[in-house]
Amino acid sequence: MSRLLALTALLAALPVSAETLQEVVNAAVANYPSIRVSNEQLKAAASNIALVRTAWLPRADLLGQVNRATKNNIYGLILPQSTLPSISGPPNPTNSLGSVWGSAVGFLVSWEPFDFGLRQANVDVAEAARKKAEASVERTRFEVAALAADAYLTELAARETLRAAEAQATRAKQVGTIVEALAKAELRPGADVSRSQAEVAAAGIQVVQARSAIAQAQATLRQFTGKPVLVVATGAPPEMASAGEVSGSPYAREQSASIAEADAKRKALDREWYPKFNAQAASYARGTGVSPEGITPGGANGLGPNIHNWALGMTVTFPLMDLPGLRLRREIADHQKSAESAKYEQVLTELNARVAKAQDQVETAKQVAALAPVQLNAARAAEAQAGARYKAGLGTLVEVAEAQRLLTQSEIDEALAKLNVWRSLLQVAVAAGDLKPFLEQVK
């Protein structure tokens, strides 16, 4: 109870603006954090496209080195490895542990003039990933908008429930006053007073629970919009519930983007097993503290480059043994694409089922809405008759209490009947993946 009072006081202290359902949805889409997260992921995917495009640029490496090392060299071959440092020059007839200075500077430019479409295929993969991220953003926006709309209607329903609960509390107090008067006049037993007080307390509990439901609904709306909102009652629901093709749903579009991404990855693998051509240009210089005759002048000789070379050429490499692994990667990619296609069919099946169920709920809600006024009128008549019979001494307080409870429930049912139609229409729009027609109907 104390938490509810504190929350109610906090909401009362905050500035509240009356907003339509469309305004609440727009605020939620603009402010909810999960949408900002998806937007940042989309920007990262777009930046990745620019990163992949840099593969067309030539590679340029600049090298500088100074060392102090022995000058011994021998005949013989050593296989390529990354542990033993290399040495150039003729072999020395004697082994000496004396050291000399050495230096090297160099510049190498390497560019792949053609790649049989591999780089473009990688760009297509990055572009497909960006489109998938874009579809994820739209799906997130749609989910937030749907949840905000449902929270809006939930608060409207809570307010209608509170109105009926407050009316019941008023009726219970009025009956309590009559019962006390009759009991004092010894026209009714004293037990009726206790029963009447119990009914007043029960009505009070309903009011407290209804106010709690409103406070929770307001907290949910504030979670989506970032500010307190006063909901505005909707008009009469339309006659028909329409739904578009579920293939246009954000869920279906996102899954379709997943298929396109998997297909792009599969096509990129088709460009993997091709020769790599690299045009290369190099300019470099080396310095050494020992002459070809083996003389070591000493001092600072070798700290600066003294022999210069340049080179132009084309290097071709072909990954012969990558084919078995590449075939398996292609097979994996084919299965992944098939899985994404199966998921797409599953999404469409589920969405169509949701649309059918939601449309049935709309028709059911409309039928209930048509019968609710009849139930309410009958409950009002029954409550009036029970009250009159009790005052005349022909009825019991139990009959009055039951009639008032039936009237309260009928008031709640009648108040929520139209809102339930709206909520069912919202479910149709959510299942179809398009809230625009629903929001236009609400206007």
Image (tube, helix red, strand yellow):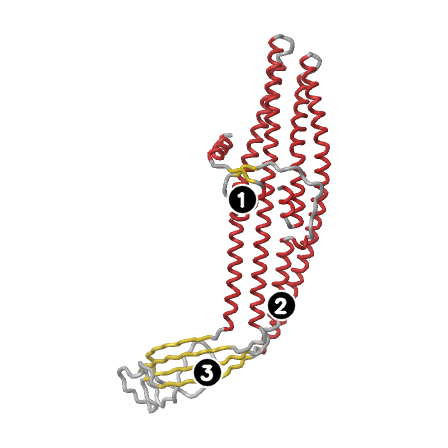
The mark that comes first in sequence, 2 or 3, is 3
Alpha carbons under labels 3 and 1: distance apart: 68 Å
Mark 1 highlights which residue? 224
Alpha carbons under labels 2 and 3: distance apart: 40 Å
Query: Considering the image in quadrants, where does the C terminus appear?
Result: top right
Q: Do the residues labelled 3 and 1 touch (CB within 8 Å)?
A: no
- The mark closer to the camera, 3 or 1, is 1
Q: Which mark is residue 266?
A: 2
Q: Do the residues labelled 2 and 1 touch (CB within 8 Å)?
A: no
Q: Which residue is drawn at 51% across and 47% down?
A: 31
**Drawn side of residue 68 relative to residue 263, left or right:** left
Q: How crowded is mark 3: few (under 14 residues within 10 Å), some or many (20 or more)?
A: few
**Drawn side of residue 98 relative to residue 6, left or right:** left
Q: Quadrant of residue 331?
A: bottom right
Alpha carbons under labels 2 and 1: distance apart: 40 Å
Residue placed farthest to the bottom in the image? Answer: 293
Q: Is mark 2 on a helix, strand or loop?
A: helix
Q: What residue type is labelled 3?
A: Ile
Q: Quadrant of residue 392?
A: top right
Q: Residue 78 carries which label?
A: 3
